[in-house]
Image (cartoon, rainbow, N blue to C red):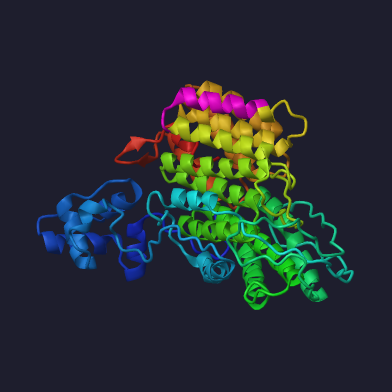
Amino acid sequence: MPGNRAVTDGEQPLGHPLSCIRAERGWTYQDVVDIVARRVGNMSARREKAWRWEHRGVVPDLETQQALASELGVPHTLLSSSPWPAWLPVGDRPAARVAWTPQDCVAALDATAGTALHDRRGFVVAGAGSAAAAAQRWLALAPRSWPRPATVPAAATVAAPAPLLVPVSGPAPVLVPAPVPASVPVPASVPSQRTGPAAVPDAPAAPVPPALLAALAALEERVPALRRMEAALGGGPVRAVADAELRLVTDLLAKGPAARPGPAAAELPARRLFALAGELACLAGRACFDTGHEAAAERYFSAALSAAHAAADRPLGARVLAAMSLQCLSAGRPQEALAVARAARAGLAREAAGDGRAAAPAVTTATVTEEPAGSVRHSSALLMARQARAHAVLGQADVCQRLLAAAGAILTPDARSSADHRADYCAEAAACELALGRPAAADHWLRRTLAALPEGRARDRAGTLVLRAVAALDQGAADRARGLAGDAGRAVEGIDSPRVHRALVALWERLHGRPERHGGGRETPGRDFAMTAL
């Protein structure tokens, strides 16, 4: 069985706050128990105790926690208000702070690109409810107004840039360059309600440097290739590349019209740059989530939501919130995941209703997994299925089934819905059935997921095979589970997705009588795999 490969930058995520403390201070497990033993005086200093605190969800007794708190300089009063391990001091624990003005967005992007990549904390750090608060704020704010110039000068014709090529082991996805726009797109007229600088209709057009437009077109074309690569090879090979692209876009924003608002034509590439920054930050966040860098994923998602708002691109903002909702589910926050998905759906409903918002920027970042610009019906249905999964985790089967049926009525019979959308819907339905403890029904949906998954989504195919093996094991079909586990092991070769690898390791431990333990020693049931492999 393949092991968990190192991520691109060679740094494995630290999956527990205590592991961060040890890494910062150079402590071994033995050092930790020795410190406690010296302060408590009646504890056997066995390193296995500290290992279990990190890896088995065992909670130290109050006296042990107080000893550690004294060593770390943490007031004992914090132990009751922030239960273990939340009180451990592991650097900045920000709320989901989202910058809502274009200038503040540039500053947030500048503080994220390049630095979040090296955040090794493999756990969420923002406080409970912060993602839901950011989602509600995004929904409440009117999209920023962008000026409409009277005329827009045509850009010089530029040669199509070469597709992004990254050395990988195994077959690489086919990269098809998108056409380069020959001119700057002209948005629709602006609404009277706005959150950004005052719009100036029919403002004199300032010339846009052709070199900027050529660079922007080249950067936009790379996004679909990066998305295909992430779907095929996992987040490991992609997150550093996406971060580097984000750094470049941020620099262009900082030096260009976003930093110094100017005539209307100069604003247009700025709007496209904000949309591109949002796409790249969301992609980097998803790649970090896939590789177990949870704190970094939070930071990228926050920056992506800010950029989507600055670009007045509600569909992009909804996609960012969908990713945040999945991270909340993975972190054991189903209520918050539900609130974030609801806000995303409400934003898409306003988009479909035409709430006076300016037209979305005409960028070339439509992907194989998202509906083309202007259509939000299928994306809203997938968010409905995400809500259903949150209700399933909460044990609310009736609400879950109603939402799944409503989403399925939109997606499955509609010939216009893509294979990716149908596969994503089936995967959500399977996760719902696993969360409700119904492995036979889950296997039905998992088989449909495999049938609908496009060939390029190798990472999701491997995760689906893992879950089919889990569902078989939960039904008592051990031989079938072993066969499917073998298929999953072969499918995951060459894929750098620690999220799927961890699920596969846990599956093999169950098959070989060494069940993965968590939360005080309970065996990991199939419903918990639904939060890891999908």
Does residue 477 appear to the left or right of 206 in the view shown?
left
User: Does the magenta portion include 454?
Assistant: no
Image quarter in which the N terminus is found: top right
Where residue 70 appears, as percent x and y from the top left, is: 18, 65
Q: Residue at x 44, y 38 (%)?
A: 509
- Where residue 142 sits, quadrant-wise, is bottom right
Where residue 505 appears, as percent x and y from the top left, is: 48, 43
Asked if residue 237 shows in the view, the reply is: no
| 25 up-or-down from 364: above or below | below
| 20 up-or-down from 82: above or below | below
Q: Residue at x 63, y 66 (%)?
A: 198
Does residue 212 appear to the left or right of 310 in the view shown?
right
Where residue 129 appears, as percent x and y from the top left, is: 40, 49
* Range covered by the magenta-colored residues: 394-409
- Where residue 492 sits, quadrant-wise, is top right
User: Does the magenta portion include 403?
Assistant: yes
Where residue 450 appears, as percent x and y from the top left, is: 66, 33
Image quarter in which the C terminus is found: top right
In depth, the one of 239 and 2 nearer the eye is 239
Is most of the magenta stretch helix, strand or loop? helix
